[in-house]
Image: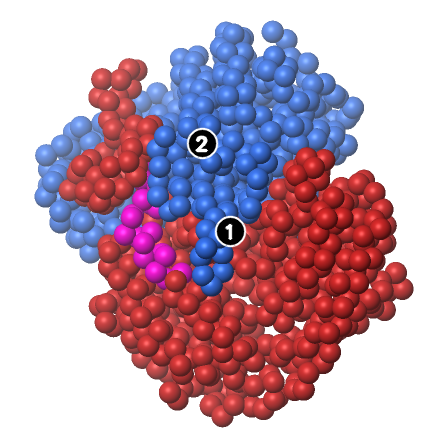
Chain colours: A blue, B red
Amino acid sequence: MKTSGENILGYNLSSIGKAVFFAKNPATGNQLETPYHEATLEEINQAITLAENAFTLYREKTGEEKALFLETIAKELLQIEEELVGLCAQETGLPDGRLKGELGRTTGQLKLFATVLRDGSWVDARVDEADPNRTPFPKPDIRQMQIALGPVGVFGASNFPLAFSVAGGDTASALAAGCTVVVKAHPAHPGTSELVGTAIVSAAKRCNMPDGVFSLVQGPSIAVGQAIVRNPLIKAIGFTGSFRGGKALFDEAAKREEPIPVYAEMGSVNPVFVLPGILKENHQTLAEGLSNSVQLGAGQFCTNPGITVLPKLEESSLFEDTLKNSIATSTSTTMLTEAIQGAYSHGLEKLKTKKEVASIATGNKAEGQAQGVAEVLSVSASNFLADKELEEEVFGPSTLLVQTTNKNEIMEIAKSLNGHLTATVHGTQEDLQEYAGLLKILERKVGRVLINGFPTGVEVCHSMVHGGPFPATTDARMTSVGTAAITRFTRPICYQNFPESLLPDELKTENPLSILRMENGKHVLP
Amino acid sequence: MKTSGENILGYNLSSIGKAVFFAKNPATGNQLETPYHEATLEEINQAITLAENAFTLYREKTGEEKALFLETIAKELLQIEEELVGLCAQETGLPDGRLKGELGRTTGQLKLFATVLRDGSWVDARVDEADPNRTPFPKPDIRQMQIALGPVGVFGASNFPLAFSVAGGDTASALAAGCTVVVKAHPAHPGTSELVGTAIVSAAKRCNMPDGVFSLVQGPSIAVGQAIVRNPLIKAIGFTGSFRGGKALFDEAAKREEPIPVYAEMGSVNPVFVLPGILKENHQTLAEGLSNSVQLGAGQFCTNPGITVLPKLEESSLFEDTLKNSIATSTSTTMLTEAIQGAYSHGLEKLKTKKEVASIATGNKAEGQAQGVAEVLSVSASNFLADKELEEEVFGPSTLLVQTTNKNEIMEIAKSLNGHLTATVHGTQEDLQEYAGLLKILERKVGRVLINGFPTGVEVCHSMVHGGPFPATTDARMTSVGTAAITRFTRPICYQNFPESLLPDELKTENPLSILRMENGKHVLP
């Protein structure tokens, strides 16, 4: 399947701009052949105007209609699995197996939102019936539910070219909410983006969705993203990427005449705390587990464990020996782009020039470009606490061991942390009892706390929180993974004294959709 | 009951600053006797540090304990009803009857949140159990719920000195959420604020709440508010007031190193659309209803109907005659402050100098200072559409009649509107059928749509939305009135692979609190 290199504006293709760019195979450094046209301001605004016009129709679609649309997108994607994985592997350097798994995650996510729409209860319907006899004033009839915000701008991420990109979690949840979507493709995988975008448009046509329910614009320039955020018809932004990129979007959005919500997931170092008891018992398994988690996907997961806090015990050296051995015998894999590999090397260099930081193990570099070579570094707790730079994310397959000598240091490190996506504690039952206070501190720092696991691997389910306090995200009140992500793109509205015939089905007295509601203060299941 | 004029920092009083200010009786223009000490930066930061320390304890309180605390605040307030209403009437010019009603609303609100806490289901608990046999990867155990954000800054409003002030909706919902609160008193009613703050502290002591769960700082300077928003320990802001004030807080919060949510309710003109059929049938009742709604509380309600869109019919003049007569025979009441009265007069003058705007009725000015004299103005639809300034709020007892000549103009006006708190449509069944599209447009503009009622009077219930798109508020995703307001001050967290003993009760497998939960994707009522 050849890609066109054009932008997808609703049901049409467009390439009026002169600026073109190319994807690159990170493993070879070779440029791929298709020229992609950067979207012009005119094209971007056209996509957004289409999205606004489509929104007035799309927001009226039933849950069933939207569910079918999401499921049809999943089907269309599975139909092009081979071409999609083939091109994506070229653009990202990620192995086929991983990409197939990621496609499964992407389609599974779309289908999961379809079940949420069919169930229908996600709108948080609330019905308070009138009481004309109440004194001193009669009680009016008021009914509340969530409705869609409007056209949403989504920025594809580089590190999950399927699951967090064009048809990823942001797009799936925004479409589920009833919003129309304009995606800015990540410039590292424009062909993958086009294939996925084409599949979405094909599904939209098959499901009779309005022209403009989805558009895809291409381009490496900052101007493309700015044009999306600045357009007054855009009502929310979804983003996964760097702190710099996410914060810039947040600042743009806050400066608009009408500020809008920005859901930027900007990464995290995902601290892992290993407590004394379990280190004694399990040092080998723990070291092997950590080594695997650090290297997963060349360390390019938002939930990569970048900091590991260790107690100083006799067994510590055994733990370190296992970890060193595992890392030293590892072979590098290709990172997503030259730039990401460059930033990784630069981040490691910056750490290693600090005299208080020691490198204790380095992996082997394989053939090919853009290799992410695993690395383990070490620093004392007191030095870690003295230098806030050591908490910055180094995106890639490395972890910094923070060596503590007592409980107090462990607690101080926890207290000193910025916001992160996850925090993990490894401990025996006794450890966890003794360190109950540690868990309470970590609760305030992250969106997900894990016990005796590793943070990589983000389950797509109803209870997942992939989010957390700033600077992990720009809005800790929301999650970007899991079904709760849908409410990022909605707001509540209430209807006062509406006749039955004018109420949405979700709020009609007879509850025709059979959804969970709060009726006169009581939750009622049909 | 004499007030001290001091700031309330947790369980202690403080007045180290030299700057003092006084309340004024708006009806007489006379200064009241107590000097109030403006809080210094040191005092404000001390209150916030206390709030942070208290938060680590208060967030662990059970729903029952927090419910008792809220109910005890209500009791304490009712015990000082007489003194409170007496002083508040002096500070605000509001009549005793209204203030007694407002106190009932305030205590009712606290009690309503207590029922929400006892029910416990508000935390949106989600349980996804592990499946170790799932392939290709085992499914982890993940459980999600809402937790409190941290210390919250609340800015008291002038127009509801009890219900939207020190123990008003923002404080009640923040305390219910598990947050500690630092209130900046509105400088127009410092004594009322102190009495209410003292009642809260008394309740906190009786309920063994930690020192710092609540503080109250005084002062008319912008610096006091800035110091609250800029303190890094503050994690959210609640505000009701002017656009200028709310937007300034929003901008400050967005500029922080760690941006935080600002819930600013900044007013609205609450457009009322009268459709042709009902105007014919009901012109007299409608005109009388509108006149009452416009004058309620000297027009100082956020939901005051500032714009009334009318069709041009034979009956229009009858409607206008009734309205004119009602307004022309009305007698003014005292506004909250000289400054508010001044801004009202200025706003009316600005409108009246526009040659396309005509004043068609003016009420009678009573004795006394700061009189809010009712006024009705009129403008053609085409002129209204041509001048965006005509949509600005004039805070006081006035409404601008917008005279339309056809359906298209009515629809164009709806489309042109900014975000507002409410929109109202008066229509017969036939009107509403013909103007179904109007309701769809208004849905996108406001937080509450009313049919055949008036927007003044905001029911405190589960389904109320007192909010709406910018510039009505800075966050349309939330409501500041009603029980849904609690989630303004929370965020989701998830626990992965936690042993039962370490899970919060809300998430334990046996559901010991008997709350509504989503279990493995299904809503389950105990």
User: Between B155 and A139, which is closer to the camera in this rendering?
Assistant: A139
Up-down relation of residue B365 to residue A106 (above or below):
below
Q: Residues within 10 Å of mark 1 (few under 14, many from 20)?
A: many
In the picture, measured across the screen, residue B450 lies left or right of residue B329, that is left
Q: Does B122 appear in magenta?
A: yes
Q: Position of residue B37 (x, y in %)?
A: 46, 85
Which amino acid is tagged 2?
Asn
At 74% from the left edge and 63% from the top edge, which residue is drawn?
B323
Image mark for residue A511? 2
Q: Residues within 10 Å of mark 2 (few under 14, many from 20)?
A: few
Up-down relation of residue A84 to residue B384 (above or below):
above
At 47% from the left edge and 90% from the top edge, which residue is drawn?
B34
In the picture, measured across the screen, residue A289 lies left or right of residue B239, that is left
Q: Position of residue B38 (x, y in %)?
A: 48, 82
> Range of the magenta residues?
B109-126
Q: Determine if residue B380 is in view.
A: yes
Which amino acid is tagged 1?
Pro
Image mark for residue A140? 1
User: Which badge, 1 or 2, comes first in the chain's sequence?
Assistant: 1
Q: Determine if residue A391 is in view.
A: no
Q: Does A244 appear in magenta?
A: no
User: Between B51 and A453, which is closer to the camera in this rendering?
Assistant: B51
Q: Looking at the figure, which quarter contains the C terminus of chain B?
A: top left
Q: Position of residue A352 (x, y in %)?
A: 38, 42
At 42% from the left edge and 80% from the top edge, which residue is drawn?
B84
Instruction: Say which element carries label 1.
Output: loop
In the picture, measured across the screen, residue A496 lies left or right of residue B350, that is left
